[in-house]
Image (cartoon, rainbow, N blue to C red):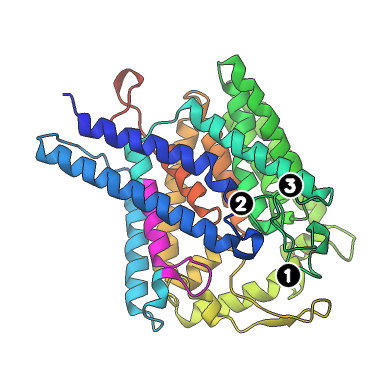
Amino acid sequence: MDRPFLKRARWVTDKFILVMLGLFPLYVGFQGYSDITASKFRFFAAAAGAWTLCVTALLLCGLARGERYHPHVRPAHLCVGLFLAASAVSACLSEYGAVTLLGSDRNDGFLTSVLYGLIFFGVSMLARPRRRYAWALGFSAAVCCAIAVLQLFGLDPFRFYPEGTNYYDKYAALTSAFLGTLGNVGMLAAYLCIPAGFLPVYALLSPHKRDRWLLLPGLLALSMLGLIDVDAGVVAAIGTALVAIPIVLQNDRAARTAGIISGGVTCAGLAGLWFWPGKSGLLYEAGQVLHGRLADEFGSHRGQIWKEGWRLFRERPWLGGGPGTASLRYDILWHNDVTGRTVAVTNAHNAYLGYLMNTGLLGLLPYLGAIACTLITWVRRRKRGPFYPALGTAFLCYLIQDFFGLSLPLTGPLLWLVWGLLESREGEQGRYKLV
């Protein structure tokens, strides 16, 4: 059956994915780092909103013209639907009222979650993995990393920093360390987890020789993860390598061997952390956590933030305080002796703890359920061309980083886009249909 309106909806979705993968990571706005969070949110909201309206109009016109669609709901769709429902109830019952729609100060409120959900459902049902998506991601990763390299040399060719400052004014003239086109180095690391996980796997598995060139931006993204001072990115890269390599290897014997090696390395690493003799640094802190000791100063004071977040969760365990309300509930202030500024904690610095605080157990559990369903799908599709193994690797890398990350709209839309592509479904003879 010829369904022209469905074809147009797919065409629009294809262009939306290209914009989000190729342009969104590079958009900084017109005021540089001073307004990057709001600028990227406006770009994301405008692109996702326009795409949603266009696709909805096309599908409604198709229904009016007699086109019939048969959505196939997968387990991950059900879980994401429950997550959004819990978020809606949490927002409605929150004492903070309309603040929950956009969030108190990070644009991470309920409407942002709705846009994430629309991306997940729309992309999974209307899109299919295409080579050009890999190249769009490779383009944005290469440009972002090239700009970051220039900034590491003290240059600021695009005037992202305030007048008279550069990267090395971090934590002194600047409130944080800003690099690349994502702003804060933590957000840059979150973004880099996607091309660093996706591009090398895709380039090595693709049957097209020209796709080998995508190894360059992939390795550049991996190198940048090592260069910037963000432990979360390094931990994510190492953890992803240990888990993903045995899964994405196409030869069963090689996969089993890699699995044994990976398991051995993991056990040896945990043993090394357990008996680590040092008294400071990341390895010492990780070892102390294994022993059940989480000091306030661990992880750039994440220990203190997580303990307070856990306490706030216990105050409202089922539905939390409402989407985007973490900054209104945290009461942690730090004084920076260098800048003379007082810094307030506004985020759980752990995406999963953030959902637990904001939407409670009823929000976090379906979210984790959706992740589990998609990871199972990834393992089952690990031999289905180059795209699914690569998407799953990027997805896993971002999820590990999210354990230490901020979960903001600066990078969140890319996670949900990758997630939607992972849940897209093939039709017969390799074609795709609305499922």
Question: Badge 3 is on which residue?
Answer: 148
Q: Quadrant of residue 66?
A: top left
Q: Amino acid at mark 3?
A: Ala
Q: Amino acid at mark 2?
A: Ile
Which residue does the numbered mark 1 point to in the structure image?
Answer: 175
Mark 3 or 2: in front is 3
Q: What are the residue bounds of the magenta stretch?
A: 102-120
Q: Earlier in the sequence, mark 3 or mark 2?
A: 3
Q: Relative to the observer, which residue lies in front, 140 or 242?
A: 140
Q: Please state if 299 lies on the left or on the right of 43 as rendered.
A: right
User: How far is mark 1 from mark 3, CA to CA?
Assistant: 18 Å
Residue 69 at x, y percent in the picture: 19, 37
**Helix, strand or loop status at disc 3:** helix
Which image quarter: residue 170? bottom right
Amino acid identity at mark 1: Thr
Mark 2 surroundings within 10 Å by alpha-carbon count, few (fewer than 14), some (14 through 19), many (20 or more): many
**Residue beneath the point at 41% across and 54% down:** 46
Within the magenta stretch, is there residue 228? no
**CB within 8 Å, label 3 to label 2:** no
